[in-house]
Image: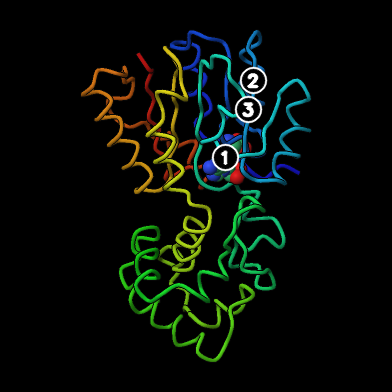
């Protein structure tokens, strides 16, 4: 069963068809393979490759897109360790997949109280969410809830966690739910959504991976490579925007999205998860 709806796929197709020079497409966050499957039906004489950190999700993608798409199990920052030839398009559809939220025993959803507090995309990742909750200092907890969760009362949260762990150990999602004991306010986003987002971003080094990829973009790409970024978190989008400005100043890219692209309302109506998507596209000169 497929869980994730690919976001803004027609825009990706439009810009790829219009601006790509080399007909090799690298889906750097292939997930369940939604984008690759769609694009393959429209870009027939293209070569597709994919990469994803998640050890399990790539099996779903491989089945879906077929064996002639080679999929690597690694971080996109390491793509050049696997594939050396020229690449026409790099797609980075950041964050997590609906697959993660719906999968058992991965710890990504606060609706699965029996799950372990894991939240790792890759099984090779050294720390999980339980480790953070059991070991991080008060200041580090505040940092991740503020920077990655945009939570205003991060200090109150950090205090509750520190107090709770004086007598308990965080193991399952249930432990975090009983520690925070949030009451749902149906008019607003569930506060646990932001707490889970912050922990997940820290566990998987999501912002540092984007930053590292952007830093090395000139050696990862080749002349004329098109880069398509879809960010869902303001911190992530800020990193992309800042690097674009820097590369523009140095005359190293041509920018195709002077204004960030957002999904149309009819897409958001059909797929609520698309609502915070922000797309930026440029080409290396
Ligand atoms: C939004 S989903 C992609 C969905 C996909 N485009 C589709 O249509 O099914 C993001 C994916 O990026 C993967 N991911 C996150 N950080 C990564 C990284 N540093 N390197 C490779 N994959 C990563 C996650 O495991 C997840 O599968």
Instruction: Classify 134 as above or below 126.
Output: below
Residue identifier under label 3: 82
Could you tell me residue 41's position as x and y percent?
67, 17
Residue identifier under label 1: 75
Q: What element carries label 3?
A: helix
Which numbered disc, 2 or 1, marks the residue closer to the eye? 1
| Marks 2,1: beta carbons within 8 A | no
* Mark positioned earlier in the residue sequence (2 or 3): 2
The residue located at (64%, 15%) in the rendering is: 47
Q: Which of 86 and 62 is in front in this view?
A: 86
- Whether residue 27 is visible here, answered yes or no, is yes
The residue located at (43%, 11%) in the rendering is: 19
168 left or right of 158 in image: right
Within 8 Å of ligand 1, the CB of disc 1? yes
Q: Is mark 1 on a helix, strand or loop?
A: loop
The residue carrying pointer 1 sits among few (fewer than 14), some (14 to 19) or many (20 or more) residues within 10 Å by Cα, namely some
Residue identifier under label 2: 48
Tell me how far mark 1 sits from mark 3, CA to CA. Answer: 11 Å
Could you tell me residue 119's position as x and y percent?
59, 59
Tell me how far mark 2 sits from mark 1, CA to CA. Answer: 17 Å
Q: What element carries label 2?
A: strand
The residue located at (64%, 33%) in the rendering is: 34
């Amino acid at each position: 069963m497929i869980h994730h709806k690919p976001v803004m796929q027609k825009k990706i197709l439009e810009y790829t068809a219009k601006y790509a020079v080399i007909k090799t497409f690298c889906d750097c966050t292939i997930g369940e393979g939604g984008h690759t499957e769609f694009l393959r039906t429209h870009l027939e004489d293209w070569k597709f490759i994919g990469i994803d950190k998640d050890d399990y999700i790539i099996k779903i993608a491989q089945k879906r897109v077929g064996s002639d798409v080679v999929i690597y199990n690694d971080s996109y920052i390491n793509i050049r360790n696997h594939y050396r030839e020229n690449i026409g398009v790099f797609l980075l559809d950041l964050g997590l997949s609906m697959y993660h939220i719906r999968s058992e025993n991965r710890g990504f959803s606060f609706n699965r109280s029996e799950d372990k507090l894991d939240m790792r995309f890759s099984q090779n990742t050294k720390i999980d969410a339980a480790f953070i909750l059991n070991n991080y200092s008060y200041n580090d907890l505040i940092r991740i809830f503020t920077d990655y969760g945009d939570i205003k009362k991060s200090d109150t949260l950090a205090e509750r966690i520190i107090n709770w762990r004086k007598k308990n150990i965080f193991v399952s999602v249930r432990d975090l739910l009983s520690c925070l004991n949030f009451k749902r306010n149906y008019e607003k986003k569930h506060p646990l959504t932001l707490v889970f987002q912050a922990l997940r971003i820290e566990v998987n080094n999501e912002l540092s991976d984007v930053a590292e990829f952007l830093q090395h973009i000139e050696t990862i790409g080749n002349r004329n490579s098109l880069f398509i970024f879809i960010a869902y978190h303001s911190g992530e989008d800020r990193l992309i925007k800042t690097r674009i400005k820097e590369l523009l100043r140095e005359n190293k890219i041509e920018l195709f999205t002077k204004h960030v692209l957002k999904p149309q309302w009819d897409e958001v109506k059909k797929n609520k998860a698309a609502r915070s998507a922000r797309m930026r596209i440029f080409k290396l000169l």
